[in-house]
Amino acid sequence: MPHQPLAAVLAAADTTGFHPGPAYFAFWALIVGAAIGGPIYVVRLIRNRR
């Protein structure tokens, strides 16, 4: 596979037939953002009360 474009490699690797749409990525971006931002928000609340 020398000099094969990345898109062709990814297309060949996709054998599941699962093609998520933009809503799927937005959903996971929201989950990741909440997982990162949630603890930061809680820590800031606790520090501000002191």
Image: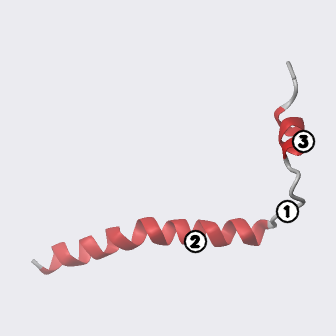
Cα separation between marks 3 and 1: 13 Å
Return the residue found at the far left: 50
What is the distance, in whole Å, between disc 3 and disc 2 at their CAs? 29 Å
Callout 3 crowding tier (Cα within 10 Å): few <14, some 14–19, many ≥20: few
- Against 46, residue 11 (above or below) is above
Q: Amino acid at mark 1?
A: Phe
Residue at the farthest front position: 15
Q: Which residue is mark 1?
A: 18
The kind of secondary structure element at disc 2 is helix
Q: Residue 50 — which label?
A: none
Q: Are marks 3 and 1 in contact (CB under 8 Å)?
A: no
Q: Earlier in the sequence, mark 2 or mark 1?
A: 1
Q: Quadrant of residue 8?
A: top right
Q: Which residue is mark 2?
A: 30
Which residue: 14% across, 81% down? 49
Residue type for callout 3: Ala
Mark 3 or 2, closer to the camera: 3
At x 58%, y 71%, the residue is 30
| Residue 5 screen position, x and y as percent | 86, 30
| Mark found first going from the N terminus, 3 or 1 | 3
Mark-to-mark CA distance, 2 and 1: 21 Å
Q: Describe residue 12's horizontal placement relative to residue 30 as left or right.
A: right
Q: Is residue 21 left or right of residue 48?
A: right
Q: Mark 3 falls on what kind of element? A: helix
Disc 3 target residue: 12
Q: Quadrant of the N terminus?
A: top right
The residue at the point 51 percent across, 67 percent down is 33
* Quarter of the image where one finds residue 29: bottom right
Q: Where 46 sits versus 28, above or below? A: below
**Chosen colour scheme:** secondary structure
